[in-house]
Amino acid sequence: MFIFALKRFAVAIPTLFILIVLSFFLMQVAPGSPFTGDFNMPPEILANLEAKYHLNEPLWKQFAYYFSDLLQGDLGPSFKYKDYTVNELVAQSFPVSLTIGSIAFIITVIMGVSLGTLAALKQNTWVDYTVMTLSMVGVVLPSFVIAPMMVLLFAIILPWLPAGGWNDGNWENMVLPVAAMAILYVAAVARIMRSSMIETMNSNFIRTARAKGLPKHHIILKHALKPSLLPVVSYLGPAFVGIITGSVVIETVFGLPGIGQHFVNGALNRDYSLVLGLTIIIGALTILFTAIVDILYGLIDPKIRVGS
Amino acid sequence: MKKPSKALTLAGIPALTLAAAIAATTASAAIVPAGIQLDNTQELTRGNGAEPASLDPQKVEGTPGSRVTRDMFEGLVTQDLEGNTIPGQAESWTISDNNKVFTFKIREDATWSNGDPVTAEDFVFGFQRAVDPATASNYAWFIEIPTIINASNIIGGKAPVDSLGVKALDDKTFQVTLEKPVPYFIKMLAHQTTFPVPKKVVDKFGDEWTRAENIVSNGAYVMEKWVVNERIVLKRNKNYWNDKETVIDQVTFLPIVSQTAELNRYKSGELDFTQEISSKHFSSLQKDIPNEIRITPQLGTYYYEFNTKVKPFDDVRVRKALSYAINRDAITRSITKRGEIPAYTFTPEAVAGFQPPKTDYGQLTQKERNSKAKELLETAGYNKNNPLKLSLLYNTSELHQPIAVAVSYMWKSIGVETTLENQEWKTFLDTKNEGKFEISRSGWIGDYNEASTMLDLKTTTHGNNDGKWSNKRYDEIMAASRTASTDAEREALYIEAEKILASEMPVAPVYQYVTGRLVKPWVGGYTTKNVEDNIYTRDLYITKK
């Protein structure tokens, strides 16, 4: 298992390097620069700006500067937010996305798995239909529809919660964004869990357990749950990175200072260093969690344990 | 429309202390009318449109940053509620006979938020910083426009920074020397690029000096908290020279980009005033809360620019025909809706000290304009068998698209076939800069309240003359306007410039911008008279809710 993990991470390093090189040069291909604006600066002023950020030097040299700083953990200054470095922007925004995302993730796992299981066990009853109809709504409605609807309902018509803001992580400010984010994933997980549970319950080893007269809750918790979770894990592993690195829609609707807004605004502003920094972080997290999923797989199902 | 005072544009008044006379009628403070009951909590939350790129006065790039810096810092002069220039950190100033040397007396009680006195050296530092290539300020040109000695050379790296024409004669006397007399120089000093900055703090903390824990400022407010993309909280600066007349204790700026999200936060009571109202929501808001809608004319124009380097837009008949055929009334009435004014001149009426002339084509009815447009196209060689085909470029937006669609139909009625092309903002800017367009949407908001802030744009060498139109007489006029010694002389030049624009039509003005905002009824002191939209929190107050 240890060697397997080691191998996974050895592959990760060149993958990450390719990601950095590609993003660095692709970013430069996009039309415009961080300094194009509705006002065309006089050439001398533009030259001063470019000199300050080394943009006047050959591209390979810029990459060398960037990469050597990166090795020391320095993601460089933001091109747009002149008073901040990318490290500082990430340090400020990542905890916000991580908090919202983690809570949404826990809710997703608990609710998605239990609702899916419930629907599977009560297959073709009103419980099943209700859960599946609701989850269909959750899957079909995009967050740019759900989130503003929630604001309208719970912040304006019923003035229970704030319509936006973070307020240093006040719980009231978290309720709506967490809910808006979780709905989508709960719906997906419930559907996956349901079909996987139905399949497991029809398999031979469960039939054997039933024949042996084991109590129902024992069968479900001890024997059926673990194998049914496999597809859920393979869905949630990669999804986890998406959840904790913020959703630009949710963050824009609720005015949250998270990573999602930085990512999209960074691209629009051609804030090269900010976009690169975030790409690297999200890339690294994706690689990390895909590896973790593989390891989890092995723990859940000995049949697919690799490398032993 | 009420015109702001002309008094301060008169550089022609030699060696005269203007400040005393002005201070008698205006004030840089909240004026609470007698009988108004103030609320116990004096806290204000403002929509700020977007996250500021910087809060360093010399590095501020857009309006979100300038709004916050205007509350935190103060220049030699500032503006009152109506946009008139009034004394700020300078209590008075004198102007030399040749209108080139300006000597400012800084208030004895002007202090930084840490208690240090504001000195002439702080201003010298601020001005030098703006042109220093090491600062790489986007707004360095702002010091070049009034021709402060050596500004251009320093920016170009051809002269040392300390050779700039600014001097501290003593602790409280600051002097600026210009190469040429620039009549609107004093007005420009309310802009953040000319604000003083605390040298000690900047030297100590470098780029991090604007953080809440480091910053020291000289305006009515000082920073308490800054969460990027969420909020900036400022609290009252007890050391501000006019703190006794400030009413609001705390102001919060929320960088809400989405107009729908901003509207929701306003409706839920989290905002006291919004940054914008979108045209999309305007009609329903007019029904629901008409009293909370506040519209201010703005110093800016929405226009279509012709690329005069591309055929057939080098032909004035084609440009005129296309401009005439735009039904501006229909656009402002049915699309923008918020009280925008149809534009037939490049300079908007909101500008101080100049009434844009009534252009001939502006006086016609739309029907007359359309038939003229057809005639012009006909003479230019376009008709049913040989229709004019063109492409109209605009940047992707909920507003520009319906306008472009409407205009393409208006042009269709005179037999023109239009292809619409929309591009993402930075791509759009790139396309325009490279001249790869035929007709493009454009807009310009003035940087200072003077007609030249608009008209200069069409001079041959201006960096934003994307259509590359060039007219010798026009360039001469704009150069002469800088040194004209009287208002009347300058106004005559501006009128001539507008007439050339109307007869050459390098751009088709569409409408004059307005600022539309929702303001809660308890926000006192808010006016709709400052056409530059400089709303200083120190002038506002909260009445009993």
Image (tube, coloured by chain):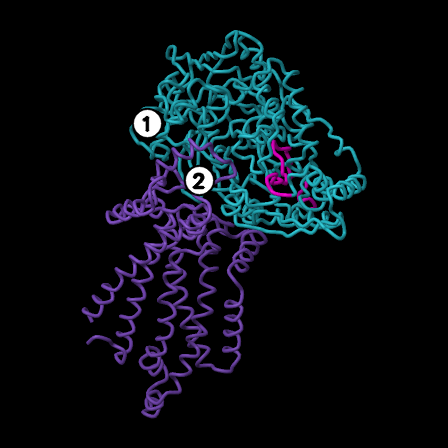
Chain colours: A purple, B cyan
Q: Which residues are magenta?
A: B286-311
Q: Position of residue A61 (x, y in %)?
A: 29, 45
Image: B346 above or below A101: above
- Quarter assignment of residue B515: top right
Label 2 crowd bin: few (<14), some (14–19), many (20+), radius 10 Å: some
> Which mark is on residue B201?
1
Left or right of B215? Residue B33 is right
Q: Nearer the viewer, residue B34 or A45?
A: A45
Within the image, what quadrant is residue B458 found in? top right
Q: Residues within 10 Å of mark 1 (few under 14, many from 20)?
A: some
Q: Nearer the viewer, residue B421 or B374?
A: B374
Badge 2: chain ID? A
Quick one: B429 or A81, which is closer to the camera? B429
Find disc 2 in the rendering and name its residue. A35
Q: Secondary structure at mark 2?
A: loop
Which chain hosts label 1? Answer: B
- Left or right relative to B452: residue A40: left
Regarding residue B82, the answer to whether it shows in the image is no
